[in-house]
Amino acid sequence: MKGLLLTAVFMLLAGVGAAGAVEYDRLIVESSRIAFGYRQMGVPMEGRFTRFQAQFVFDPQRPQQARAVIEVDLASIDTGIAEANDTAQTRAFFDTRNHPRARFVAQSIRALGGDRFEVTGELTIKGRSHVVSAPFAVKREGDRLLVSGALPIRRLQFGVGEGAWADLSALADEVEIRFQLVAAPAAAAVNRKGNTK
């Protein structure tokens, strides 16, 4: 009898866990943001990219099964200064004519405890690829999932800022990519359109 009771409790808990699992696979672009911070002549500067897209599948309860590919349109850079935006697209920096997009492909995601995770994957900028890792946190708001984190990189590893701009006293090597992504399950989009009940 005791064994049957324990089995019933276990099955109930397993069912609750399965019911609470939600798989997110749709990026709400208009609510998401990809920005970056750097130092020029020792002064903190910031910027952002206004066009990007992502294909992913992520369930916080099963992070090991997650998949993600994020692409950023480098020509959409916005530093707040038109001249700087133009310079960033030249051959010395992103060379957007030959390398219009930066691409990140997740290789693994591991849980760090609570609502924190770490993603490791291959980042490609200007035709150069390196494996990078970034911690991130998730927060549920209704049917949406807010994903926020920061990825530190060294720009010279990717050939960004060559020639005179390789002088680290003028432009620091360290750049922090900051992301705030808002995701929703595809089913939520369908329900809001009234196509299903």
Image (cartoon, rainbow, N blue to C red):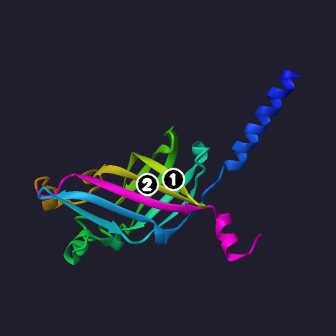
Q: Residues within 10 Å of mark 2 (few under 14, many from 20)?
A: some
SS at badge 2: strand
Q: Specify whether 171 is left or right of 12.
A: left
Q: Kindly report the distance in space between the C-alpha atoms of the residues bearing marks 1 and 2.
A: 9 Å
Q: Can residue 94 be seen in the rendering of this structure? A: no
* Residue 68 point in image, percent of width and height: 53, 55
Residue at image location 36% in from the left, 66% down from the top = 99
* Residue 82 point in image, percent of width and height: 23, 77
Residue on which disc 2 sits: 148
Q: Quadrant of the N terminus?
A: top right
Give the vertical position of 171 relative to 99 (above or below).
above
Please state which amino acid type lies under the numbered disc 1: Lys
Residue at image location 86% in from the left, 26% down from the top = 4
Q: Specify whether 35 is left or right of 163.
A: right
Q: Can residue 55 be seen in the rendering of this structure? A: yes
Give the vertical position of 137 relative to 146 (above or below).
above
Q: Are marks 1 and 2 in contact (CB under 8 Å)?
A: yes
Q: Quadrant of residue 84?
A: bottom left
Q: Residue furthest right?
A: 1
Please state which amino acid type lies under the numbered disc 2: Ser
* Residue 77 point in image, percent of width and height: 32, 70
Disc with the residue nearer the chain's start (1 vs 2) = 1
Along the line of sight, which residue is nearer the eye, 11 or 125?
11
Part of the protein shown in magenta: 170-197
Q: Quadrant of the C terminus?
A: bottom right
Mark number for residue 139?
A: 1
Residue at image location 54% in from the left, 61% down from the top = 183
Q: Nearer the viewer, mark 1 or mark 2?
A: 1
Residue at image location 38% in from the left, 69% down from the top = 100
Along the line of sight, which residue is nearer the eye, 79 or 144?
144
* Residue 46 point in image, percent of width and height: 26, 63
